[in-house]
Amino acid sequence: MFIQRIESPGLAHWSYYLEDDGEAFVIDARRDVAVYADLARSRGAHITTILETHRNEDYVVGSVELAERTGALIYHADSELEYSYGTAIEHKQRLLIGSYELDALLTPGHTHGHMCYLLRESGSPWMLFSGDLLFADDVGRTDLGPEGSAVEFARELYHSLHDMVFMLDEHTIVWPAHGAGSACGSAISSRPYSTLGLERALNPLLQLEESAFVEQMVERSARIGRPPYFTRMERMNLEGSRFDERGVLPPLSPARIDELLDDGALVVDTRDAECFLAAHVPDSLAIPSSMLGAWAGWFIEADAHLILVSEDPQRDMTELSRMGFDDVHGYMGGGIAAWEVAGRTVARTHTLDTPGVCRRLDEGAVLRVLDIRTADEVEKLHIESAQHITLRELPERLDELTPEEPIVIFCGTGRRSTIAASLLERAGRESEVVLGGTAGWSSDRCPLRGVDSA
């Protein structure tokens, strides 16, 4: 048996290619599917079967296009949903891959019809492809059902884990569909795989009784929020979507960018935070490339026409496409330097280091420290007198910021603060970004509860 995990950075999505005796299966294919077809071709194998663990919400599934390329059969989960493609797989349905057996296990909770796939060797459990049910040190979110169903889904998840999955041998290897940083969990560890025994021993959620588990899952759902683009992903993943392989993304001249901006296009600047802060197109949306998977779905409208300012526009275009953002016109040719040379207006965002902002407060300066970290982060390390509005809530809560006070934005490192600064700029508010985060925060006037003052 040959197994290859295919990683999609940013979204922290993991799909799987399984092959035995020239026959290959793919589990939870991503939208850009050439990687699977190329792998099979290089190994002289044929992809015969495509499996889905559930209707995904955080990325566009590539099952339909992969089936068109290979002639493979598609089995989708969530049989009660109205898919326009494939066949619904049934609980305990057994598929053969070479000399191995693969069993479908109905494991509701993340979605109502979620499926795990159990690989058996000579009849004995060997590997569990757990989808979004079970991650390393975490479990899948349970707030993706109809409104008001979070408690029901949390109970389903608890029983799927304890009455189904953990009845298997503890040596069973667990291959989840996501790693650390995914929007489908909140505390996924960096382990690339796990075992049922490790999860039973180390996963804190598996130590809870049912009532406590349900309570924590419901509370977590309210805390982490649901990105707006999830709804569009649900629709696209029932219809089946294809990947637009447009080749090389074209460079755009300043004059062409002007035309697109006049037509309502949005500049998305994916450069490092320091580069954006130093110089950017006015009213750009800053999302560093490494954070696109986490934040693009919160702040980019579904039908947005996009222009990239990027060090690697092809990579960023592909990542945006995996989230269903397809209307990328091109990228700024020559970068921000070409924009400046063409005589266009360049915006800049002021920055402060943490000792600097503390010094200003110690001197009695009037300013508003805006802390955009998550509630969990604030609970661990609290900035006295700061106004707390999480980054994802910021666009809807801008009216809570006092117009007369200068705004100083604080997060863990400055990267999320850069996103926040771009949102404020688009709303007509100036701000300064505090670089360095909690590590540099030191002042008697600005105590940080939870750590010793430097």
Image (spheres, helix red, strand yellow):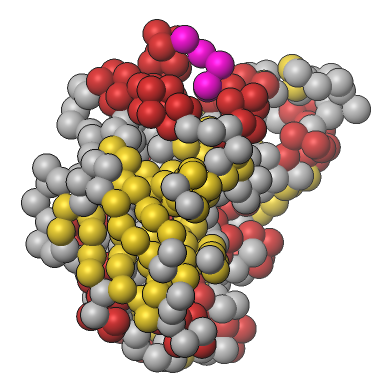
Is 372 placed left or right of 434 in the picture?
left
Where does residue 279 sit, x and y in percent of width and height? 61, 69
Which of 1 and 8 lies nearest the eye of the viewer?
1
Query: What residue is at 26 percent from the left and 74 percent from the top?
Result: 72
> Which span is picked out in magenta?
205-209
Which of 142 and 97 lies nearest the eye of the viewer?
97
- 295 to 452, vertically: above or below: below
Which residue is situated farthest in the right direction here? 454
Which of 122 and 259 lies nearest the eye of the viewer?
122
- 24 to 259, vertically: above or below: above
Is 399 placed left or right of 315 in the picture?
left
- Give the main secondary structure of the magenta stretch: helix
Is 90 placed left or right of 281 in the picture?
left
Q: How many marks?
A: 0
Looking at the rendering, which quadrant does residue 147 occupy?
top left
**Quarter holding the C terminus?**
top right
Query: What residue is at 64 percent from the left and 64 percent from the top?
Result: 272
- 261 to 116, vertically: above or below: below
Query: What residue is at 23 percent from the left and 69 percent from the top?
Result: 73
Instruction: Find out whether residue 208 is within the magenta segment.
Output: yes
Where does residue 184 sit, x and y in percent of width and height? 43, 42
Which of 280 and 217 lies nearest the eye of the viewer?
217
Where does residue 81 sit, x and y in percent of width and height? 12, 46
Instruction: Find out whether residue 289 is within the magenta segment.
Output: no
